[in-house]
Amino acid sequence: MNEKYLLINSKAASKQSEESREMKKMDWQKLLELLKGHKTYIQAHNFPDPDALGSAYGLQCFLKKHGIETEICYDGRINTLSTMRMAEEFNIKATQFDKIKDMKEEDYIILVDGQKYNSNFTDLPGDEVACIDHHPTFIECEYHYTDIRIAGSCSTLIAEYYVQSGTPMDENVASALMYGLRMDTASLTRGVTQLDIDMFGYLYERADNEKIMQLYINTMQISDLKAYGAAIENVDFENGTCFAYIPFECNDALVAMISDFILSLSEVKVCIVYAVRGNGYKMSVRSLLKNVHAGKLISDALEGIGSGGGHAAMAGGVIYPNEKKTWHYNIEEIVKQRFMNIIKQGDLMAARCGYQRAESTS
Ligand SMILES: [Mn+2]
């Protein structure tokens, strides 16, 4: 079932990508023109993952080759083993916003691997003039330069800047982009478009593939097992949909990894994994069903109490801090009710339109 699903998904995704590529073409010359003479920061999403860091670094080196110096910044922390090791291995210099003392309102910011108003993007003092991202847009925002196209990773889009402009790519950049591409697409098995495959081929010839394989080993720490244990302990399964609650703080990447893990159970078609985040909650959603779009599901289910969005197969979001006080006694009940309501509405719609659930058609 999985393989078939992926085939359908990848065909649909590449069609979608072609459409969106027509709408918003990348224009590397326009980007260079825009940035000339401005102090520029490249902002990766909060708590950057390998794709965010890889694309920020790839873009930084691209711009440098064209005479534009930039600084990579992010809010939150680099707190997963995979991202920490990546930064170290590829010598990527990214500065936590707290340590940047001199960002001014007139400084330029390019957002990578996410968009303004996303729950995982802190609004820094600088001016967000450009955005390069591979996620669907949930809240529209005008930038001077926009390159938002659906693809498996943001690293894919950045790789294309080198290809289109004929800019030479060194091994370190190719490796960082390759790692980002592989991590976001689970090595080309998730949300893959034709562009991802093309760029994979391009990067493969230039990257240190041995080093990338090394990064794949030891990506978890003993302390992560506590979160897996809690999620397994609190699993609640109903009709193909699985909820798992982690009642303590847990970083974004770990919540996402546990979400992938729960989805690997053969009975699970949709899963919602969430953990305490300050006074609110951090959520991760996965869907294998054609009629359940993970991004729309989380966005609708959290309406009024949080925000979220993402791809058809994977999405993330947060429940706002002030909500926890009122609800933490029965958070599991509330989350389940909200998500199941949306899923059931989808099923009703699907039944009316004569669709079938994906698992019964493939
Ligand atoms: Mn990404």
Image (cartoon, grey):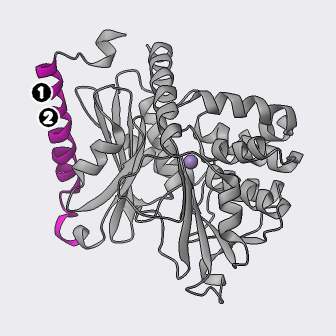
User: Range of the magenta residues?
Assistant: 325-353
Which amino acid is tagged 1? Answer: Leu
Label 1 CA crowd tier, 10 Å (few <14, some 14–19, many 20+): few
Under tag 2, what secondary structure?
helix
Please identify the dominant SS of the magenta region: helix
Q: Is residue 228 above or below residue 121?
A: above
Question: Which quadrant is the C terminus positioned in?
Answer: top left
Q: Residues within 10 Å of mark 2 (few under 14, many from 20)?
A: few
Q: Nearer the viewer, residue 297 or 36?
A: 36
| Residue drawn where x is 42% and y is 61% of the image | 118
Q: Position of residue 16 (x, y in %)?
A: 45, 31
Quadrant containing the N terminus in the rendered view: top left
Residue 325 numbered mark, or none: none
Q: Residue 35 in the image: x percent, y percent?
A: 68, 70
Is 342 in the magenta?
yes
Q: Residue 293: where, in percent of width, then height? A: 33, 36
- Can the viewer see residue 234 in this picture? no
The answer to whether 261 is drawn above or below residue 38 in the figure is above
Image coordinates of residue 297 in percent, x first then y, are 28, 42
Circle 1: element type: helix
Q: Is mark 1 within 8 Å of ligand 1?
A: no
Q: Which residue is mark 1?
A: 348
| Residue depicted at 69% across the width and 53% down the height | 28
- Tell whether 218 sits left or right of 14: right
In the image, taking residue 347 as reference, residue 28 lies left or right, namely right
Image quadrant in which you'd find residue 76? bottom right
Q: Which residue is mark 2?
A: 345
Amino acid residing under circle 2: Gln
> Are dots 2 and 1 in contact, CB under 8 Å?
yes
Q: Is residue 358 visible?
A: yes
Name the residue rendered at 85%, 47% in the picture.
169
